[in-house]
Image (cartoon, helix red, strand yellow):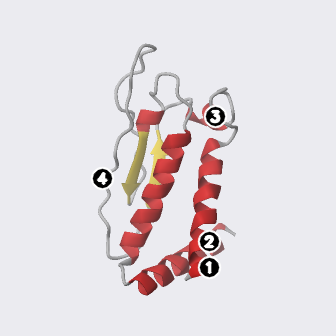
Amino acid sequence: MADKNIAQLNLDISAIAQKLKLGVGQVQRFIGLTLYSEIVGGNPVDTGFSRANWNMTVGSPDFSVHGTYRKDGNYAPQTPQIEASVELQPLFITNGVNYVVFLEEGSSQQAPNGFIRVAIERVKSEFEQYTIKL
């Protein structure tokens, strides 16, 4: 099932790129940055440590953690530096903070259960609506 969805996504990205006269990597980068922004924006915040530790990489996942957790910390999210490639490449949005899975499962009062899934569905819906309009 996942392979079928990925194959369809690749076809959709290629079709959009062709219609807009853009490279597939540019379209993939745009979708990836949009998803990254939705996830980071939906991440519940106490100190901001988990929000500041989202990574977006091409080719392989990055589970590194930036800094050390401090209860009195004031952390700011990273801005991903992703180059648009000519071809589709695996794109990863990851977080190495050990409690982010609990935040996703709803352990925080500050964000809904499944904030990552909500972000994915939101971007997926926007992308599907966009492809229909083309």
Q: Please tell me in which quadrant of the rendered image residue 125 appears.
A: bottom right
Viewer can see residue 6: no
- Label 2 near label 4: C-beta < 8 Å? no
Q: Secondary structure at mark 2?
A: helix
Marks 1 and 2, how far apart at CA:
6 Å
Q: Secondary structure at mark 1?
A: helix
Percent coordinates x, y for residue 13 in the rendering: 49, 76
Q: Earlier in the sequence, mark 4 or mark 3?
A: 4
Q: Nearer the viewer, mark 4 or mark 3?
A: 3
Percent coordinates x, y for residue 92 in the rendering: 45, 55
Q: Secondary structure at mark 3?
A: loop
Q: Residue at x 52, y 23 (%)?
A: 46
Marks 3 and 1, how far apart at CA:
31 Å
- Position of 51 compared to 86: left or right? right
Disc 1 target residue: 132
Q: Residue at x 63, y 31 (%)?
A: 102
- Label 2 near label 1: C-beta < 8 Å? yes
Q: Please tell me in which quadrant of the rendered image residue 65 appears.
A: top left
Q: Secondary structure at mark 4?
A: loop
Quadrant in which the C terminus is drawn: bottom right
Q: Which sits in the foreground, 1 or 116?
A: 116
Disc 2 target residue: 128
Q: Earlier in the sequence, mark 3 or mark 1?
A: 3
